[in-house]
Image (cartoon, rainbow, N blue to C red):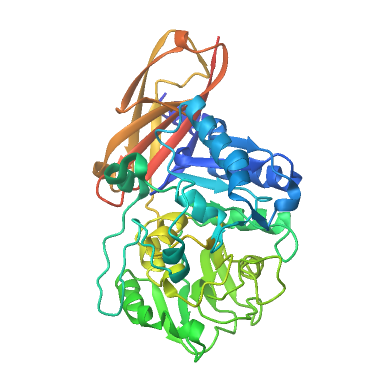
């Protein structure tokens, strides 16, 4: 009987890898006017088990993709319908990040120009222009260091940040891909996302390369590299500082450099699943311009994420991912959490790739009991149990029914009579303790008759 029960659970219940940020905390935005946007969002929602109630379908002119949008259009076409959808669906209490599919504008017209993610981050409030231009805005997520003599802060997961920032917490966001002129194809973006999902918990044995040169783009953050190498090696992650690009088929988990033009596909290097690469230049995120290599080149070469500014950044390190990104990542943060803890002024940056990639996520599972049958009626007692080497660390639980929070305990008394007839989804999430909390989840589809 016990063996049969385990088989039922594995067949009918979808389990999720432990990570700091969970799919139920993601709002996925889709441009319904674009076939690519729909296909890529559908693939990502499937890969990452994002609840259907977390998917918001918007309508933007496809010609705005990879270009700029006015603040007024951002408000009416993106911000207002997305926030209203969260409120009407009753999910705003646990949404921590927004994820844009493809076919969205990358920049917002302002002086100086902002990225769409910058204005999203500020909750649609315009920033101080001087602080934006000079990179002096300081994100509350930034964990330092501020200079060669500064000290970093501890890595944190976004749910912990929400605990001390409350409803004023900025809205971190990423874009799944850039499809179009100088961008990637839809197939390339989906391949990137599949690699990202496959990276979770793999603890890749590749190397993080910090490439230096006499270029000012390289020099502006070279001071960050020695500390990052030391901290990564303490975490058993190989990292090197070099004055030449890796060649000869190196296995790359990360690469930071500073150069106008790069060719990531040169040298037959292998970008491992979960890798992030970025080359700190003025036009990597400006797709209407043919000048300089675009961030999409790293995605095409096999990286899971990359970044670039949407306007001239004036070679300020504060506007780009710091080397400490990889330390947050190696401690178990997701891609998007690592990005925002390593960028001091994220108002002009375009972050592209899989936000939930988490190669150093701990292993574990959640098992549900009480829902062994697919058909449910009356009152059912549902309980969640963690299976993990760190089982005792998972002390906080949450149940969601159809994407809405329904309980904060390990046991849920599910009253099927309060649900409409038909298909429903029950999800259990277990959180570990600490300021960097990993989480496990499992999901079961039920039918109420």
Q: Is residue 94 left or right of residue 352?
A: left
In-front residue for pair 108/5: 108
Q: Please report the residue visible at 71 percent of the width from the left and 52 percent of the height from the top.
A: 64
Q: x, y (%) of residue 337?
A: 41, 55
Q: x, y (%) of residue 316?
A: 45, 75
In-front residue for pair 126/7: 126
> Which quadrant of the figure has residue 134?
bottom left
In-front residue for pair 157/202: 157
Q: Is residue 171 left or right of residue 268?
A: left
> Where 258 falls versus 39 (above or below)?
below
Asked if one can make out residue 6 in the rendered structure from this viewpoint, the answer is: yes
> Where 373 falls versus 97 (above or below)?
above
Q: x, y (%) of residue 161?
A: 32, 48
Q: Please report the residue visible at 55 percent of the width from the left and 79 percent of the height from the top.
A: 250
Q: Please report the residue visible at 58 percent of the width from the left and 49 percent of the height from the top.
A: 71
Q: x, y (%) of residue 376?
A: 49, 13
Q: How many labels were placed on the picture?
A: 0
Image quadrant containing the N terminus: top left
Asked if one can make out residue 320 in the rendered structure from this viewpoint, the answer is: no
Q: Is residue 243 left or right of residue 145?
A: right
> Where 94 falls versus 238 (above or below)?
above
> Which quadrant of the figure has residue 331?
bottom left
Image quadrant containing the C terminus: top right
In-front residue for pair 18/255: 255
> Where 173 falls versus 59 (above or below)?
below
Q: Please report the residue visible at 41 percent of the width from the left and 67 percent of the height from the top.
A: 326
């Amino acid at each position: 009987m016990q063996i049969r029960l385990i088989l039922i659970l594995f067949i009918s219940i979808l389990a999720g890898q432990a990570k700091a940020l969970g799919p139920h905390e993601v709002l996925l935005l889709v441009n319904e006017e674009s076939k690519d946007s729909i296909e890529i969002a559908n693939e990502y929602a499937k890969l990452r088990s994002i609840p259907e109630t977390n998917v918001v379908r918007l309508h933007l002119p496809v010609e705005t993709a990879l270009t700029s949008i006015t603040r007024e259009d951002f408000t009416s076409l993106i911000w207002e319908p997305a926030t209203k959808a969260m409120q009407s669906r009753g999910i705003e209490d646990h949404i921590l990040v927004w994820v844009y599919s493809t076919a969205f504008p990358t920049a917002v017209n302002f002086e100086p120009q902002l990225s769409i993610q910058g204005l999203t981050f500020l909750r649609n409030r315009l920033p101080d222009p001087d602080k934006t231009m000079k990179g002096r805005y300081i994100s509350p997520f930034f964990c330092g260091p501020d200079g060669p003599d500064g000290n970093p802060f501890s890595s944190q997961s976004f749910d912990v940040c929400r605990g001390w920032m409350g409803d004023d917490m900025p809205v971190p966001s990423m874009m799944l891909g850039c499809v179009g002129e100088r961008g990637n194809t839809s197939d390339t973006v989906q391949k990137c996302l599949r690699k990202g999902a496959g990276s979770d918990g793999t603890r890749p044995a590749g190397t993080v390369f910090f490439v230096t040169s006499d270029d000012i783009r390289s020099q502006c953050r070279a001071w960050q590299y020695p500390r990052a190498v030391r901290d990564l090696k303490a975490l058993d992650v190989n990292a090197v500082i070099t004055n030449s690009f890796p060649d000869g088929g190196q296995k790359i988990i990360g690469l930071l450099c500073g150069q106008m033009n790069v060719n990531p596909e040169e040298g037959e290097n292998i970008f491992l699943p979960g890798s992030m690469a970025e080359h700190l230049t003025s036009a990597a995120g400006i797709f209407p311009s043919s000048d300089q290599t675009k961030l999409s080149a790293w995605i095409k070469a096999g990286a899971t994420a990359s970044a670039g500014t949407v306007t001239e950044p004036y070679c300020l390190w504060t506007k780009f991912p710091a080397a400490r990104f990889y330390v947050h990542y190696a401690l178990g943060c997701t891609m998007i959490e690592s990005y925002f803890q390593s960028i001091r002024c994220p108002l002009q940056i375009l972050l592209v790739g899989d936000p939930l990639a988490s190669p150093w996520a701990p292993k574990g599972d959640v098992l549900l009991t009480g829902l062994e049958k697919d058909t449910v009626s009356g009152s059912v007692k549902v309980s969640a149990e963690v299976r993990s080497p760190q089982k005792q660390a998972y002390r906080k639980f949450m149940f969601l029914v159809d994407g809405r929070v329904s309980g904060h305990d390990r046991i849920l008394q599910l009253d099927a009579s309060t649900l409409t007839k038909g298909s429903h989804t029950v999800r259990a999430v277990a959180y570990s303790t600490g300021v960097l909390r990993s989480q496990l989840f499992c999901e079961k589809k039920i039918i109420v008759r």
